[in-house]
Image (cartoon, rainbow, N blue to C red):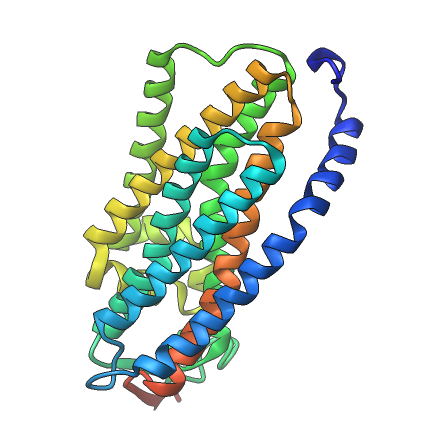
Amino acid sequence: MVKLKQFTKQNLRQELKVVFGKISTPLMLFGLASLALAVMTPIVIGVSGQRPTLFLTAAVGVGIIILSALFIKAASRILHLRAAWAILITFFLSTIAVINFVLIPDAMYSKAVYRIEEGAFLGKIGTFDPNNIFTYIFISIIMLAIYLFVFGLYYLFYRAKVMKVQSPPGERKHRSAMVTGVAIVVIVLLLISFGGGSLLLLILPLSLLGFGAEYFNTIFWNGGLAILIAFVVAMIFAYDSIQKSARDSIELKRPTLIVACAWIAFSVLLMYQIVWIVYMTVLLTIAPFKVIYFSSK
């Protein structure tokens, strides 16, 4: 085993190639099964009253959670990861799955009618049209960036600790950092919920494209409290999972462990967004949103 102090970034990259070579097959099977679930479940269960039922969204959400849990279990066995980390990261990813596949679709369909102004900046591309697949591609990129930004901050902090062979700080500092991070997330989400000038500064690129503010206003006005609580819970589990993987890396003298754990989570989050695009496309195909188009000319 390479000593922790002698481990370089080049060694890290080389060992990570080996790691992902081992889990590539389970990851591919997880992705294919998730895509099949996202396509077939809405078709088999169907919709009621021109919108997906809670049973439908819950079935997809639970199915995705089970599939991701099976993947985490398989990856943990292959890479000899500790069960405590696997449980924490499964809770984190499960909460994200609830947000993506249950809460967000329900919030979007809760809005009775969408008013779409044709001729907006960049035309169709710059318009928040819930019946346009481009909308979901763009939103998935933004949501993935938000998830990875918060999760990545925790990861980079603890990876630096591992590479410096320093024990994680005391429990009080851990809890203080977590509370601070959660408080920032809550403030950001509240700003998004209530809109205004802060919203434009926060998501300026989306606002310029014309549909960012509309999307966030829609989901938070129709399911804001549940989404807010779920997101905060997800970030707490993300923090705890990164902290646990850092401690395991130091105790077991396996510096690649924290990186492997984080990139397993990154891979699942990326897969979630791909599946979500397909899932929303299927939903809008069998149950189109009610939209009124009018010209801005």
Q: Can residue 71 be seen in this view?
A: yes
Q: Can residue 136 be seen in this view?
A: no
Residue in the image at 51% along x and 27% along y: 245
Q: Residue 185, relative to residue 131: is it above or below?
A: above
Residue 170 x, y percent position in the rendering: 40, 10
Residue in the image at 57% along x and 50% along y: 267
Residue 253 x, y percent position in the rendering: 63, 16
Residue in the image at 38% along x and 51% along y: 96
Q: Residue 186, relative to residue 59: is it above or below?
A: above
Q: Nearer the viewer, residue 236 or 204?
A: 236
Residue in the image at 34% along x and 39% along y: 185
Q: Which of 14 and 151 is in front in this view?
A: 14
Residue 83 x, y percent position in the rendering: 45, 31
Position of the N terminus by quadrant: top right
Position of the C terminus by quadrant: bottom left
Q: Nearer the viewer, residue 187 or 45?
A: 45
* Number of marks drawn: 0
Image quarter of residue 212? bottom left
Q: Residue 277, relative to residue 142: is it above or below?
A: below
Residue 207 placement, left or right of 138: left
Residue 246 placement, left or right of 240: right
Residue 269 x, y percent position in the rendering: 50, 51
